[in-house]
């Protein structure tokens, strides 16, 4: 099961990196000659901030490192994740670029939902020091992990 969680987390991280491709992505074949030149990293950060809704203040680059969960609860509905979901979220968090070489702080995890957006937060001592915006496919994976669903590839050795 542990290998499956890590594999799913890495796959999700790879897909998350493709989040700005497809419908609504800028047309790379017709540049606006009057628009300021922006690096892809700047465009991605700008789009993520626009998509974060009420969670923007805790996800932007200059956000405080740690945030009281009570502050998050004041603007959203919180759902406590199971221990298996917490481990999945930890694995996912370290795989999201920039890839972390350390486990993030936390002994539990929550999903905060508001305005059609969801933010996953790792929690320790009533604070979240690791957070990310969660698209619907991540929420679907979290639901599967919570139910114990997995797609067995074979038998464990």
Image: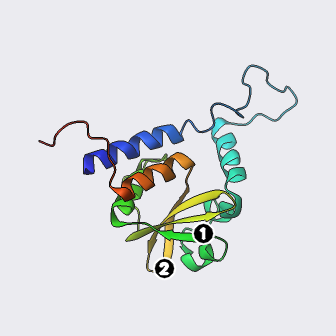
Residue for point 74% across, 19% down: 29
Give x and y (percent) for residue 92. Answer: 42, 51
Q: Secondary structure at mark 2?
A: loop
Residue 56 quadrant: bottom right
Is residue 96 depicted above or below 121 in this figure?
above
Q: Is residue 100 visible?
A: no
Q: Secondary structure at mark 1?
A: loop
Q: Nearer the viewer, residue 102 or 52?
A: 52
Residue for point 44% across, 49% down: 141
Dot in front, 2 or 1: 2
Give x and y (percent) for residue 138. Answer: 49, 49
Nearer-N-terminus badge (2/1): 1
Q: Is residue 31 visible?
A: yes
Give x and y (percent) for residue 93. Answer: 44, 54
Residue for point 29% across, 45% down: 4
* Farthest residue, direction left: 157
Q: Quadrant of the C terminus?
A: top left
Q: CA distance from mark 2 to mark 1?
A: 15 Å
Is 109 placed left or right of 77 in the picture? left
Residue 87 quadrant: bottom left
Which residue position holds label 1? 64
Q: Residues within 10 Å of mark 1 (few under 14, many from 20)?
A: few
Is residue 93 depicted above or below 107 in this figure?
above
Residue for point 46% across, 43% down: 13
Could you tell me how many numbered marks the image carries?
2
Q: Residues within 10 Å of mark 2 (few under 14, many from 20)?
A: some
* Farthest residue, direction top: 29
Is residue 53 depicted above or below 29 in this figure?
below
- Give the number of the disc on residue 154: none
Which residue position holds label 2? 126
Is residue 154 depicted above or below 88 in this figure?
above
Give x and y (percent) for residue 110. Answer: 48, 67
């Amino acid at each position: 099961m542990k290998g499956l969680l890590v594999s799913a987390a890495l796959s999700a991280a790879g897909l998350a990196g493709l989040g700005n491709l497809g419908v609504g992505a800028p047309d790379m074949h017709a540049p606006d000659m009057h628009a300021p030149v922006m690096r892809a990293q700047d465009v991605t950060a700008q789009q993520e901030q626009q998509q974060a809704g009420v969670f923007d203040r805790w996800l932007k680059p200059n956000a405080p490192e740690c945030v009281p969960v009570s502050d998050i609860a004041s603007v959203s509905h919180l759902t406590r994740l199971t221990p298996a979901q917490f481990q999945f979220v930890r694995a996912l968090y370290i795989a999201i670029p920039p890839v972390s070489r350390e486990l993030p702080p936390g002994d539990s995890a929550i999903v905060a939902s508001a305005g059609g957006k969801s933010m996953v937060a790792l929690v320790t001592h009533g604070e979240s020091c690791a957070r990310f915006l969660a698209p619907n496919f991540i929420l679907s994976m979290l639901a599967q992990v919570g139910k114990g669903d997995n797609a067995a590839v074979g038998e464990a050795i």
